[in-house]
Image (cartoon, rainbow, N blue to C red):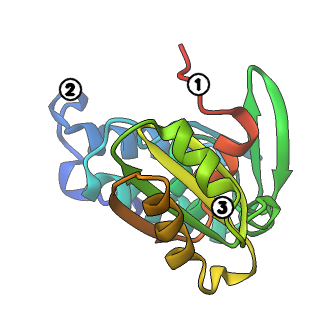
């Protein structure tokens, strides 16, 4: 009963497994997998297909297990999940480990402290060429119909220079967003932007 309470399933103790929602079934799966107190708990994409509430509940359960001393090896395609749950992250591509470190250090490894995403009309590759030459830009690349621009040194004054360079080249900028590097930024920088099968 303790595990059912820990995974917020005590009120469903008598329910048939097939009657549980996807989130409840996932939590039950994790509860069953720790009943025998394994030295290492392997979780393969435990939040795939879950609604946001179930996903947060699963994150909470994983945090609690880890805080109690459980070693967990988690595979996920969700970079935010890896950032939130993992003390060390291995980025893999085609069966090879490309990077292994803490989330903070992996994000520091990207040649940027600010990532600007620029959506513009016209050829993204032409915009990459224009923006790569702007002072403060460490790199630029086209991805998913936008241009990702990596800035170093806080990017002070770089955003206006990016917009002026695009305008001078006759490229109309539709939208700009600014963020810190994420594990997704790291993943893309290590594996490339091509679609995967």
What SS does tag 3 mark?
Answer: strand
Q: CA distance from mark 2 to mark 1?
A: 39 Å
**Residue at far top of view:** 197
Q: Is 59 situated above or below 157?
A: above
Q: Which mark is residue 194?
A: 1
Q: Which residue is mark 3?
A: 150
User: Does any portion of residue 88 appear in the rendered image?
Assistant: yes
**Marks 2 and 3, how far apart in space?**
48 Å
Q: Are marks 2 and 1 in contact (CB under 8 Å)?
A: no
* Residue corresponding to mark 2: 18
Q: Residue at x 37, y 50 (%)?
A: 120
Q: Residue 114: image x %, image y %?
A: 62, 71
In this rendering, the answer to whether 174 lies above or below 13 is below
The mark total stands at 3
Please name which of the two marks, 2 or 1, marks the residue nearer to the observer.
Answer: 1
Q: Classify residue 48 as left or right of residue 124.
A: left
């Amino acid at each position: 009963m303790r595990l059912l309470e820990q995974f917020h399933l005590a009120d469903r103790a008598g329910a048939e497994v097939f009657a549980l929602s996807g989130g409840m079934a996932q939590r039950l799966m994790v509860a069953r997998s720790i009943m025998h107190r394994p030295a290492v708990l392997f979780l393969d994409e435990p939040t795939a297909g879950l609604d946001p509430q179930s996903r947060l509940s699963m994150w909470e359960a994983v945090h609690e297990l880890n805080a109690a001393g459980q070693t967990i090896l988690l595979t996920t395609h969700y970079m935010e999940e890896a950032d939130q749950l993992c003390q060390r992250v291995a980025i893999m591509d085609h069966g090879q480990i490309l990077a292994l470190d803490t989330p903070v250090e992996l994000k520091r490894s990207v040649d940027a402290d600010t990532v600007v995403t620029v959506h513009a009309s016209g050829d993204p590759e032409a915009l990459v060429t224009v923006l790569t030459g702007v002072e403060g830009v460490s790199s630029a690349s086209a991805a998913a119909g936008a241009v990702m621009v990596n800035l170093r040194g806080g990017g002070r004054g770089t955003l206006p220079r990016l917009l002026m360079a695009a305008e001078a080249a006759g490229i109309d900028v539709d939208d700009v967003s600014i963020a810190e590097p994420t594990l997704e930024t790291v993943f893309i920088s290590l594996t490339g932007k091509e679609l995967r099968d």
